[in-house]
Image (cartoon, grey):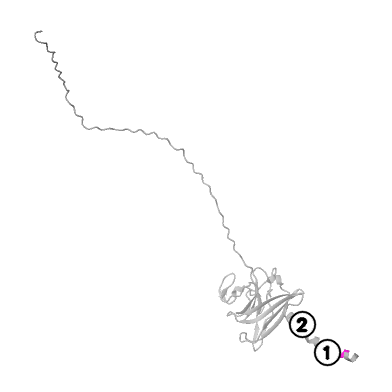
Amino acid sequence: MKIGVSFAVAALAATIAPLAACANPQGGQGAATSSSGAPSGTERMNTQLKAADGTQVATATIDFANGYATVTVEATANQLLSPGFHGLMIHSAGKCEANSAAPNGGSTGDFASAGSVFQAQGHSGHPASGDLTALQVRSDGSAKLVTTTNAFTAADLRNSAGTALILHQDADYLGSNATGDGGKRIACGVIASAAATSTATTTSVTTSTSTTVVPPPSTSTSTSTVTVTSGPSTTYPPTTTVVTTTPPSLPPNS
């Protein structure tokens, strides 16, 4: 009897197990998705570094935790990056525009819009706050760099001008050149965009009141002279009336 019950329980367990697996289809994928995000207690900023023609060259993440930033830059095998060291710097404006001028004007060039190398508030020395370890590219064009720095915070990078990560053609020698010593800028990714500026147009309406003094109506007296012109007068001679009186006739033999 016990053997029959055990067999029934085992058969029931074998039936329930596949159903439980179907009820949780994520399996190990859930852990993989979680690990792709920032670790607990970490603030992460991401960007894609692209060439002037828009081709993606590399990806970058900056994780902030425990008082410092961990910068990770990775490029897959491609024909865009030449083997060797390439300067990697954070620049002081969050704009990546091809054939552009610097924020303060001057000659144009690819990603000149990103401005000079970033300096955190209160820091003016060199290496600059935005100077990072150079990216070493392997012979197949791939590369991966993980470096740390406490020269800036996430809030520093989110300043009103924004910031951008730029990959240079040559190695950077961390000198005092404000635009960097890495030569041509070959790839750029916006870390934090510049704050949007809005121009408010104020329309003022001015109401003017004018008072017009109307003089009282004037009374004018006009005298009209009527001249009557008559034609030539005709003078007639006086009319004489002759009255003849006939005496009454007497009867005969009176």
User: Residue sitting at 68 percent across and 79 percent down?
Assistant: 60
Q: Residue at x 69, y 78 (%)?
A: 61
Q: What kind of element bears circle 2? A: helix
Task: Classify the position of the N terminus by image quarter.
Answer: bottom right
Residue at 85% across, 89% down: 8
Residue 32 locus on image (x, y percent): 74, 82
Tell me where the magenta segment starts and ends, as one range. 5-14
Residue 71 position, x and y percent, is 71, 78
Residue that numbered label 1 is attached to: 11
- Which residue bears the numbered disc 2? 23
In front of the other: label 2 or label 1? 1
Crowding at mark 2 (Cα within 10 Å: few <14, some 14-19, many 20+)? few
Q: Please provide percent x and percent y for residue 253.
A: 8, 8
Furthest residue to the top? 254
> SS of the residue at dot 1?
helix
Q: Relative to 209, is 76 above or below?
A: below
User: Is 40 left or right of 248, judged from the image as shown?
Assistant: right
Asked if the stretch drawn in magenta spans residue 162, the answer is no
x 71%, y 72%: residue: 154
- Please tell me which of labels 2 and 1 falls first in the chain: 1
Q: Nearer the viewer, residue 1 or 73?
A: 1
Q: Nearer the viewer, residue 143 or 168?
A: 143
Viewer-side residue, 178 vs 224? 224
Q: Is residue 62 visible?
A: yes
Q: Quadrant of residue 2?
A: bottom right
